Amino acid sequence: MQATNSISKLVEALVRCRDSEPDGYAEKAKQTIQKWLKRNTIFTDQPRLFGLFQQLQLLIPIEEKGERKDSPQVLVAGEREMYEPAKALIDFISECIRLQTKLKAQPQRLIEPFEKVDTTPVDSEYSWQIDIAMRCRSLSDTSLSPPTSGHSAVKEPKQQLSRPNVANTFAYIELKRHVKDTNEAYAQLFRYTKEIYATQHNRRFAWGMIMCNTIVNACVFGPNYAAASEDMDLATAAGRKDLIRLFVNWSFCDSCKLGYDPAISYDDSSQCLVIQPEPTAGNPAMALYSREVLICAEQMFGRHTRCFAVSANKPPPPDPGDKQRKPHQQMKCDTIVKDSWVEAPEDPAEDTRDEARHLSVITERLQNVNSVRGMYPRLRDDCQSGRVHLADPVTGNLYEDTSNTVLGDSVWSQLGKTSTALRVFKRIYMNDIGTPIKYARNVQELIIVAADVMRCHWQIIKECRILHRDVSLSNMLVCRDDDG
């Protein structure tokens, strides 16, 4: 890509200036930046670029006589001294992407570091210190869904913060002074990224990065896999170019490639999530609104099941004068939206355990059985339940959202040689809303719910020849009448 080559040439020219005159390269470096600006942009932000390069160069070992040193070391004394140079490296690449106004195509966003490093995110439930957190700053991509926070109620994401917040974090970076600490860096990145899934309810998969000495690895975390890139060595021109290419791709790609769900966004005026079902021939485009997340994706791996309480009616802004009800209690919801990544065959016709298909059968065969009316979910007939599809940004063609399409054929073929099974992203729209059984008001209500669950399961086995097999706390909901 043009942007990658342009930024890479600038970095290598600055590195050559420094290596040829380590003690007096400043003026020559400034002239190099000025020439680059004249070729690529209408701006003249030369002092900022030079200042950032002065910081980031500590991560690039000095070469002697044009040859790389054996076992190069970054020019810092310890891990903490790596934070600011690493942040400057990201800032430098982001600034160069922003400044290139003469490109045929313009970036849709910038990937930038939060200002504060080595700190605890303001909305984190844990006390761990994050080395560097990165965020997306949207430029023109209106489909980029702002991350949303809140474990039981949807909260408004705070966009402008110097200190990291989990709700707006795109990816974390874990730094180590020595390459021997690579496994420890991966372990910490796993632990931190788990909270992104629990907090960002529109996250399909997550990115991350580690930097151990001069070696950088990008990571992608899905429902049943974690994949890392080849080493990108900052001590080599090829490694630096690979890192630049990664940030350029993040800046120019479609938002779904960043791991966000394009069907879920945040509405500032109503302070709620907006979920857009896939339009079909019989069901035109519509929107569902939610302020309450019943179940969060709190595990690093697995189905990543999320359940939203939604309404087809757009709610007014929350009433601050209503002290008795929280914002999500000021909405009347009649539908549950369930998202999950489930193991399934690639061919939908072979998917004999498809939940949407089973619910369709159950709805049809039990519609006249009064003894279990209201005890099982029914599919909404105006929303398309089942496998989720994404649109190719170039052709507009739809394709299924699976672990294969996330990683690409080449990477997935390597994982496929192991026991990693294909997972498919599915979304189901169900009527008859309830709350998790853990919110039962008393023992009597708990017993009633348990009895109803057994009665309903028996009728489903009897009438539909379907055995649920997963009777868990997450799958039992308390459904109350209007009178409670």
Image (tube, grey):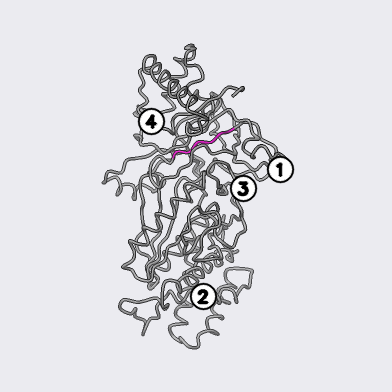
Q: Earlier in the sequence, mark 2 or mark 1?
A: 2
Residue that numbered label 3 is attached to: 156
Q: Earlier in the sequence, mark 2 or mark 4?
A: 2
From the image, give the main secondary structure of the stretch colored magenta.
Answer: strand
The vertical placement of 218 against 43, above or below, is above
Give the SS element for disc 3.
loop
Give the SS element for disc 1.
loop
Q: Earlier in the sequence, mark 2 or mark 3?
A: 2
Q: Amino acid at mark 1?
A: Pro
Q: Nearer the viewer, mark 2 or mark 1?
A: 1
**Taking the image as drawn, is residue 58 in sight?**
yes
- Which region of the structure is painted magenta? 305-310
Say whether marks 2 and 3 touch (CB < 8 Å). no
- Disc number placed over residue 53 in the picture, else none: 2
Q: Amino acid at mark 4?
A: Pro
The vertical placement of 382 against 205, above or below, is above
- Disc number placed over residue 348 in the picture, else none: 4
- Disc number placed over residue 155 in the picture, else none: none
